[in-house]
């Protein structure tokens, strides 16, 4: 009961806006309150935590951040949730990802760990909010954060930044609701040494392997492979094309791969230069040498024998549906259209343990 008291806060705030939009401005406040109350009741009677998303029948993926560092009202920055038998693991926590998860109604106390691919701001920016909101949701122990060398500094920084907030919330709500010892993030660093990949986490239900990717000059940078019940999901992290990604994606059911359209980014860079925005032109142009074009991602997926290729961490953004055609131009000539999808926040992919092809659906996000 105590955990459930605080979980609905984010949903209530979102529903307030939904109710206000539903009720005409000219209506009495009492009628608006009625809309609000009914909306809250409906939301709480059917929480996402009680759906099949968290059953033990499939390995699942939910995209919680498919955007790039560029602003995008429809996409949070990099975040992928991998769900294994009632527990969720996040790969990266980019800015806006926690807000997106809350608008889904995602039970943040189900998050059992975070795996960071590297330490660019668009991959770590929401660690602090995840730390706080998962604690509010009922997390009762420090949240593990796994990552390559440097993760101790990142985790230590967020713990220090939120230390006063921890004190305030425990004093306000009480130790029984907000146990102070549960607030923190706990760093679990690993060093691949001379290896191109190795297991960095294992329990009875899932094995997680980290492998090197090519995001030079950013080092270390890794991707992750999750294996459970004979099914497998790979998350690329940020990378230029590299044989090591192909190696560790071999036979994967799903490959969630970053994607940067060299053609579209080139257009932005040239237009910026023509407008006299030399700094912007250079900054945009610099991204071309350490990311992967959608066509190259498709070739890698083919070589690795991947079942479903999911494009994520999209650069530039795709604010108009027509731009998706430009973004993926040439992909269909390389890979069967049934074997790839352009990801979006809320995309869900199920991999039944009983076997079969990936099953795609959508997790609803309030207001989107």
Image (cartoon, grey):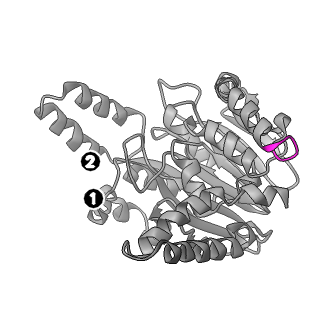
Q: Secondary structure at mark 2?
A: helix
Question: Quick check: is 300 in the magenta stretch?
Answer: no
Q: Please, is residue 310 above or below residue 175 in the view?
A: below
Q: Nearer the viewer, residue 187 or 296?
A: 187
Corner quadrant of residue 288: top left
Asked whether the viewer can see residue 87, the reply is no
Magenta region, residue range: 173-177
Q: Main secondary structure of the magenta part?
A: loop
Tell me where residue 181 appears, x and y as whole percent.
85, 34
Asked whether the viewer can see residue 287, the reply is yes
Residue pictured at 63% horizontal, 63% vertical: 105
Q: Which residue position holds label 1? A: 326
Q: CA distance from mark 2 to mark 1?
A: 8 Å
Q: Nearer the viewer, residue 291 or 70?
A: 70
Q: Secondary structure at mark 1?
A: helix
Tell me where residue 142 appears, x and y as whole percent.
80, 38
Query: Label 1 crowding class (10 Å Cα cut-off): few <14, some 14-19, many 20+?
Result: few
Quarter of the picture holding the N terminus: bottom right
Q: Which residue position holds label 2? A: 264
Residue pictured at 55% horizontal, 36% vertical: 125
Q: Earlier in the sequence, mark 2 or mark 1?
A: 2
Query: Label 2 crowding class (10 Å Cα cut-off): few <14, some 14-19, many 20+?
Result: some
Is there a contact, CB below 8 Å, between mark 2 and mark 1? yes
Tell me where residue 172 appears, x and y as whole percent.
76, 40
Side (left or right) of 166 relative to 361:
right
């Amino acid at each position: 009961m105590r955990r459930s008291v605080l979980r609905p806060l984010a949903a209530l705030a979102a529903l307030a806006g939904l109710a206000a939009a539903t009720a005409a401005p000219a209506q009495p406040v009492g009628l608006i309150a009625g809309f609000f109350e009914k909306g809250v009741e409906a939301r709480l009677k059917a929480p996402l935590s009680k759906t099949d998303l968290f059953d033990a029948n499939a390995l699942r993926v939910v995209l919680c951040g498919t955007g790039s560092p560029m602003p995008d009202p429809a996409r949070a920055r990099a975040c992928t949730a991998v769900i294994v038998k009632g527990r969720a693991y996040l790969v990266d926590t980019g800015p806006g990802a926690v807000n997106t998860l809350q608008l889904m109604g995602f039970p943040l106390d189900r998050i059992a760990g975070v795996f960071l691919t590297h330490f660019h701001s668009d991959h770590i920016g929401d660690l602090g909010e995840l730390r706080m909101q998962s604690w509010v949701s009922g997390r009762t122990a420090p949240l593990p954060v796994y990552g390559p060398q440097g993760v101790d500094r990142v985790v230590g920084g967020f713990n220090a930044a939120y230390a006063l907030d921890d004190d305030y919330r425990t004093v306000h709500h009480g130790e029984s609701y907000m146990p102070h010892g549960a607030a923190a993030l706990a760093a679990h660093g690993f060093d691949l040494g001379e290896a191109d990949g190795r297991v960095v986490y294992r329990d009875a239900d899932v094995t997680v392997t980290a492998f090197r990717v090519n995001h030079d000059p950013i080092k270390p940078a890794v991707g992750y492979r999750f294996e459970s019940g004979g099914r497998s999901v790979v998350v690329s992290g940020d990378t230029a094309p590299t044989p090591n990604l192909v190696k560790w994606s071999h036979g994967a059911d799903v490959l969630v791969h970053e994607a940067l359209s060299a053609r579209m980014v080139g257009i932005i860079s040239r237009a910026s230069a023509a407008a006299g925005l030399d700094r912007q032109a250079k900054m945009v142009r610099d991204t071309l040498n350490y990311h992967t074009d959608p066509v190259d991602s498709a070739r890698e997926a083919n070589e690795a024998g991947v079942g479903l290729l999911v494009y994520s961490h999209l650069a530039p953004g795709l604010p108009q549906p027509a731009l998706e055609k430009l973004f993926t131009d040439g992909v269909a000539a390389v890979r069967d259209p049934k074997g790839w999808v352009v990801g979006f926040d809320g995309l869900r992919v199920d991999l039944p343990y009983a076997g079969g092809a990936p099953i795609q659906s959508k997790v609803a996000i309030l207001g989107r």
